[in-house]
C-alpha cells in the first residue's frame, strides 16, 4: 500500500492516462470497423450494379436476338469479371460469386457458338439450346444477386459483432478503471482527512498555549508524518526554552523582520553586477521591458546604447585582470555620472554595457548624448600610478523605428556597435551615420 499522498496522486494520474488511452483506442477501433464496413458495402453495391446491368443486357438480348445485343451482354459480363478480379481484399468471400461469374462466361461462350450456328441454319435444336441457356442465365443472375445480398448481410453482421465486442471490452475496462479511480479517491480523501484533523488539533492546542502537545504520526501518510515531525520538534524546542508568549511573539517578529531584510538584500544582489554595482542582465531585461511597454502606451520613443570596450582582452592579458576590473569599474562609474537617474545603465556581461535613455519625445539630442558618453568614458584611467587610455565602440538603436521588442532593440544596437568598431578611436553609430567620435588612442 502506498503511504504517500504524492504517490497516490501519481498512481491516479497514471490510471487516468490509461483510462484516456482506452477511450481513444475504443473510438479508433469503432471508427476502423465502420470505415471497413462502409468500404465493403460500397464495393458490394458496385457488384450489384454490374449484376443489374448484366441482367438488363440479357433482357435486351432476349428481345432483340442480334449480335449487337449479345456483344453488350459480353461486355457487361467482362466488366463484372474485371471488378471481381481486381479486388484482392475479399477474395475468399467472393469465391462463390466468382464461380457463378465463370459459369456465366461459359454460357455466353456457348451462346456465341449457337448464335453462329443459327445464323447459317435455322435448326430447331439450336433454338431449344438457346432457350435453355437463357433459362440458366436467369438462374445464375438470381444466384448472383442472392450471393451479393448474403455478403452484404454477412458484412453487417460481422460489423455489429466487432463493434459489440469492442464496446463490451471497452466498457469492462472503463468500469474497472472507474472503480479503481473511485477507490483511490476515497482512500486519498480518508487518509487526508485523518492527517488534516490531527494537524488541526495540534495547531489548535498550540494556539491555546499548550506547547507540550505532540501530534501522533502513527498511520499517517508520509507528507503528514513529516509535518507532524516538524511540529513536534518545534513544540519540543518551545517546551525546552519555556519562553513566554510575549517573548515568542517578539522572537517571531524579529526573525520575520530579519528574513524580510535578507530577502530585500538578496533581491538587490540578484539584480546588481557584483563588480561594477550596475544592473545585471536580469534587471536590465526587466526594466527595458517596462520602458518599452510604457513607450507602447504613451506613443513615445526609446533610444538604447550598446557600449563595448575596444581591445579589453589585451588589457587583461598584458597588464592583468586587476587592471581590467579597474577599467570596468571606472567605465561603470562614468556612465552613471553622465546619465540621468531616470536612465537605465547596466552591465550586460564581460566588457559590454547598456544605456537606455528611457521614454523621449524625439531623437534630436541623441548625437549630443552619444558624444557626452564617449568623451566621459574615453578619459584616461589611473591604475597603480599609470594612465590607461581606452577607446569604446557604441551602437544605438531606436524604438519603434528600428525595433519593437527588447531583444530586437539590443540586437540592433549590438550590430551597430560592431559597425562602429570599423572606425578609428571611440565611435558611435546608429545604422545610418556616425553620431559621435573621439580619436583618443588606446594603449596596445
Image (cartoon, helix red, strand yellow):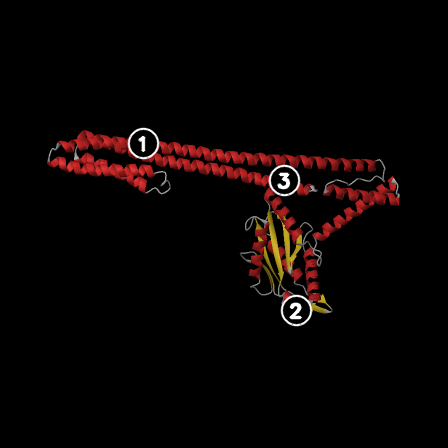
Q: Along the horizontal axis of the image, is 369 left or right of 38?
A: right
- Work out whether 190 lies above or below 233: above
Q: What residue is at 27 percent from the left and 39 percent from the top?
A: 102
Relative to 359, residue 381 above or below: below
Q: Position of residue 238 (x, y in %)?
A: 85, 43
* Residue topped by disc 2: 317
The quarter of the picture where the N terminus appears is top right
The quadrant of the rendering that contains the C terminus is: bottom right
Looking at the image, do the residues carrying marks 1 and 2 touch, with CB atoms under 8 Å apart? no
Residue 372 seen anywhere in this rendered image of the structure: no
**Residue 98 seen:** yes
At horizontal 75% and vertical 48% (from top left) the residue drawn is 263
In which quarter of the view is residue 433 placed?
A: bottom right
Q: Are marks 3 and 2 in contact (CB under 8 Å)?
A: no
Q: Which residue is mark 1?
A: 145
The Cα atoms of the two marked residues, 1 and 2, are separated by 97 Å
Percent x, y of residue 360: 62, 48
Return the residue at label 3.
Answer: 12
Question: Which quarter of the picture shows residue 75?
Answer: top left
Amino acid at each position: 500500500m502506498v503511504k504517500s499522498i504524492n504517490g497516490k496522486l501519481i498512481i491516479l494520474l497514471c490510471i487516468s492516462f490509461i483510462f484516456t488511452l482506452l477511450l481513444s483506442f475504443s473510438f479508433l477501433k469503432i471508427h476502423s470497423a465502420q470505415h471497413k464496413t462502409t468500404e465493403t458495402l460500397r464495393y458490394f453495391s458496385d457488384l450489384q450494379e454490374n449484376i443489374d446491368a448484366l441482367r438488363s443486357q440479357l433482357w435486351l438480348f432476349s428481345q432483340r436476338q442480334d449480335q449487337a445485343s449479345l456483344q453488350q451482354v459480353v461486355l457487361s459480363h467482362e466488366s463484372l469479371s474485371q471488378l471481381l478480379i481486381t479486388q484482392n481484399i475479399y477474395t475468399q468471400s467472393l469465391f462463390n460469386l466468382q464461380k457463378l461469374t465463370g459459369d456465366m462466361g461459359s454460357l455466353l461462350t456457348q451462346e456465341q457458338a449457337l448464335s453462329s450456328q443459327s445464323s447459317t441454319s435455322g435448326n430447331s435444336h439450336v433454338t431449344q439450346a438457346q432457350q435453355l441457356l437463357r433459362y440458366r442465365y436467369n438462374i445464375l443472375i438470381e444466384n448472383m444477386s442472392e450471393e451479393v445480398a448474403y455478403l452484404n448481410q454477412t458484412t453487417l453482421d460481422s460489423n455489429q459483432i466487432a463493434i459489440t465486442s469492442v464496446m463490451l471490452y471497452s466498457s469492462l475496462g472503463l468500469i474497472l478503471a472507474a472503480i479503481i479511480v473511485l477507490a483511490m479517491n476515497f482512500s486519498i480523501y480518508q487518509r487526508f482527512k485523518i492527517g488534516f484533523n490531527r494537524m488541526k488539533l495540534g495547531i489548535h492546542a498550540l494556539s491555546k498555549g499548550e506547547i507540550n502537545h505532540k501530534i501522533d504520526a502513527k498511520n499517517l501518510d508520509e507528507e503528514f508524518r513529516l509535518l507532524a515531525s516538524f511540529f513536534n520538534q518545534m513544540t519540543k524546542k518551545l517546551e525546552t526554552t519555556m519562553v513566554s508568549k510575549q517573548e515568542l511573539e517578539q522572537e517571531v517578529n524579529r526573525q520575520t523582520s530579519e528574513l524580510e531584510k535578507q530577502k530585500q538584500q538578496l533581491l538587490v544582489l540578484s539584480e546588481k553586477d557584483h563588480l561594477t554595482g550596475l544592473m545585471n542582465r536580469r534587471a536590465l531585461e526587466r526594466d527595458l521591458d517596462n520602458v518599452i511597454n510604457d513607450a507602447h502606451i504613451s506613443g513615445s520613443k526609446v533610444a538604447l546604447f550598446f557600449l563595448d570596450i575596444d581591445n579589453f582582452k589585451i588589457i587583461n592579458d598584458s597588464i592583468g585582470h586587476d587592471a581590467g576590473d579597474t577599467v570596468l569599474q571606472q567605465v561603470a562609474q562614468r556612465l552613471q555620472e553622465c546619465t540621468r537617474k531616470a536612465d537605465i545603465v547596466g552591465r550586460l556581461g564581460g566588457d559590454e554595457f547598456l544605456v537606455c535613455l528611457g521614454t523621449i519625445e524625439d531623437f534630436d539630442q541623441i548625437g549630443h548624448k552619444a558624444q557626452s558618453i564617449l568623451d566621459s568614458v574615453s578619459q584616461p584611467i589611473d591604475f597603480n600610478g599609470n594612465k590607461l587610455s581606452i577607446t569604446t565602440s557604441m551602437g544605438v538603436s531606436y524604438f519603434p523605428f528600428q525595433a519593437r521588442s527588447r531583444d530586437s532593440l539590443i540586437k540592433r544596437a549590438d550590430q551597430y556597435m560592431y559597425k562602429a568598431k570599423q572606425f578609428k578611436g571611440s565611435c558611435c553609430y546608429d545604422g545610418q551615420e556616425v553620431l559621435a567620435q573621439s580619436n583618443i588612442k588606446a594603449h596596445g
